[in-house]
Amino acid sequence: MSTKDKAFVNKRRQLPMYCVLIDHPHEGVILWETGCGKDYPEVWGPQVSDVFSRVKYEPHHELDAQIEATGHKVEDVKKIIIGHLHLDVSSCRRHTSGRHSLPCLHDHLLTLV
């Protein structure tokens, strides 16, 4: 079926943004990804926020609140793994301050460095 003569409608979709907290027996608490943070729209401005819009973000979505819901505190996090370098993780860099961050680069990205 062709869509040649039909108007295109760009629908917004709700997609989860994952952060994973790992309570490792030897390494301690490890955070995989950090999320975008509550100040994402202000940090990136209206142009980027429109293209990469956030449909729903509430106080209980904040990284601090999510970590505390597991019985841990942000200060318990010993290492942070940044698995990719998209906008959805770059606004929450305040959580990496003073912690060991491990950027995980794919082999094909290492050739660009």
Image (tube, rainbow, N blue to C red):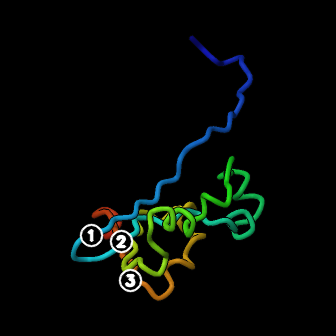
Q: Are marks 2 and 1 in contact (CB under 8 Å)?
A: yes
Q: Residue furthest front?
A: 71
Image quadrant for the N terminus?
A: top right
Disc 1: which residue: 24
Q: Amino acid at mark 3?
A: His
Q: Is residue 9 left or right of residue 95?
A: right
Indicate the quadrant where residue 33 lies: bottom left
Residue 41 image point, x, y percent: 72, 62
Q: Where in the figure is residue 102, as x and y percent of width and height?
A: 36, 76
Depicted 5 relative to depicted 56: above or below: above
Give residue 78's quadrant in the image: bottom left
Of the image marks 1 and 3, the number of the one nearer the N terminus: 1
Tell me the residue that label 3 is attached to.
Answer: 100
N-terminal of the pair, mark 2 or mark 3, is 2
Instruction: Please identify, in this view, whether the residue under mark 1 or under mark 3 is nearer the observer.
Output: 1
Please give the label number shown on residue 30. 2
